[in-house]
Amino acid sequence: MNDITVAEKKKYTYRPNKKNKLFMEYWLESTSETFANVYKSGLRAGFSPSYSKNLLNIAPKWLVTYID
């Protein structure tokens, strides 16, 4: 079993940078013109086309931590 203490969990707290924040806002905000569209939200936030296209496949730590 993977028992992580509260102190250990705090070490891995999600700390978004500007692009990460923008992406999450564009992707999850129902009033956004790119709502629920990972690719378009990624592009709009400033990520490259290839990174935006594969964002959910590569599952970067910042995204996984946010979703968790």
Image (cartoon, rainbow, N blue to C red):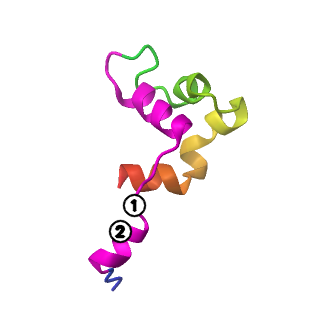
- According to the picture, the residue beneath numbered tag 2 turns out to be 10
**Residue at screen point 44% across, 25% down:** 26
Q: Amino acid at mark 1?
A: Thr
Q: Nearer the viewer, residue 17 or 43?
A: 17
Q: Classify residue 50 by image quadrant.
A: top right
| Magenta stretch: includes residue 42 | no
Q: Is residue 18 magenta?
A: yes
Please identify the residue farthest to the bottom as the structure is shown: 1
Q: Quadrant of the N terminus?
A: bottom left
Residue 30 at x, y = what percent?
31, 21
Residue annotated with mark 1: 13
Name the outermost residue toward the left: 6
Magenta part of the chain: 5-31
- Residue 24 lies left or right of residue 17; in this view the side is left
CB atoms of marks 1 and 2 within 8 Å = yes
On screen, residue 39 versus residue 51, left or right, reads left
Above or below: residue 50 compared with residue 66: above
Residue 7, placed above or below residue 66: below
